[in-house]
Image (spheres, helix red, strand yellow):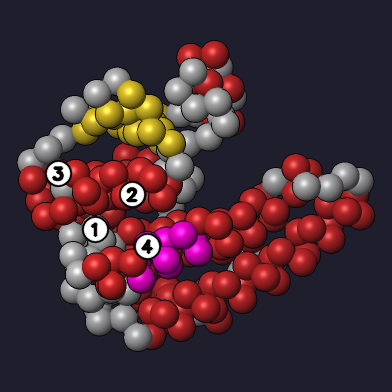
Amino acid sequence: MLKLYFAPGACSFVPHVALEIIKAETGAGFEPSLVKLHKGEQSTPEYLALNPNAQVPVLLVDGKPLTQIVAICDYLDRSAPQAGLLPADPWARAQAMSMLAWMNNTVHPTFTHIFRPEQFTSGDEGIAEQKRFNTARFAQLLERIQGHIAGAHPWLFGDRITFPDIYAVVFWRWGGIAGVDPAALPAYQAYVEQLAALPAFAAAIERERIPLHMYRKA
């Protein structure tokens, strides 16, 4: 059985939902394992032996750890192609992988510069500027995702939910944390609410005990 190390609301939500979809499609279960980042569990010797980067997610496959979202998603798709988490057509699959990679290497790090600016600069002024600049950039990236959603039928890559759909839900929540007003992204909000109501998403949300909407008006 696969074992997923996850943290509530983190990017590990992507394989978490994916594993729920795979379970529904194939009957193959998985073992979820909560990592309490606020308590530093990602930095214990035991966890660092699985992932020296002290990050979630980690997918344990036959006792062997696999890290990094893109690699984990690729493995899950190849292991359970019937779940349709990436398109079967080679060109469509490449396009979905391209979007997944962009989400992971551009959208995700932009939020990291908001949430943990001290990792990239020092001093109050530097930290404040990191937050200001990257919040504006993150809002632009969410608008770009909304543009993709506008052409979705019904999901980003057709009638099957794929990894980019799941990652987009993560960014929606993070937008609220960053202070991006969801009223400016109505199509995005409607899309996220539709996804969140589906059984695989609802199961992961319940297990992680996370609210969908994080925005609080100043």
The Cα atoms of the two marked residues, 4 and 3, are separated by 22 Å
* Kind of residue sitting beneath label 2: Cys
Residue 206 visible in the current orientation = no
The answer to whether residue 209 is magenta is no
| Residue 35 on image: x %, y % | 46, 28
Which residue is painted at 45% across and 42% down in the image?
68
| Residue 214 on image: x %, y % | 52, 58
- Name the mark on residue 73: 2
Mark 3 element type = helix
Circle 1 packing at 10 Å, graded few (<14), some (14-19), many (20+), is many
Mark 2 element type = helix
Q: Earlier in the sequence, mark 3 or mark 2?
A: 3
Residue tagged 1: 85
Residue tagged 4: 97
- Name the mark on residue 23: 3
| Residue 142 on image: x %, y % | 54, 72
Task: Please report the bounds of the magenta region as a residue range.
Answer: 95-103
Residue 175 shown left or right of residue 32 in the figure: right
* Kind of residue sitting beneath label 3: Lys
Q: Earlier in the sequence, mark 1 or mark 2?
A: 2
The answer to whether residue 96 is magenta is yes
Mark 4 element type = helix
Examine the image and state in which quarter residue 114 appears.
bottom right
- Residue positioned most to the front: 90
Q: Nearer the viewer, residue 180 or 138?
A: 138
Q: In the picture shown, does residue 124 fall above or below 101?
A: above
| Residue 206 on image: x %, y % | 31, 45
Q: In the picture shown, does residue 131 fall above or below 207?
A: below
Circle 3 packing at 10 Å, graded few (<14), some (14-19), many (20+), is some
Q: Earlier in the sequence, mark 4 or mark 3?
A: 3
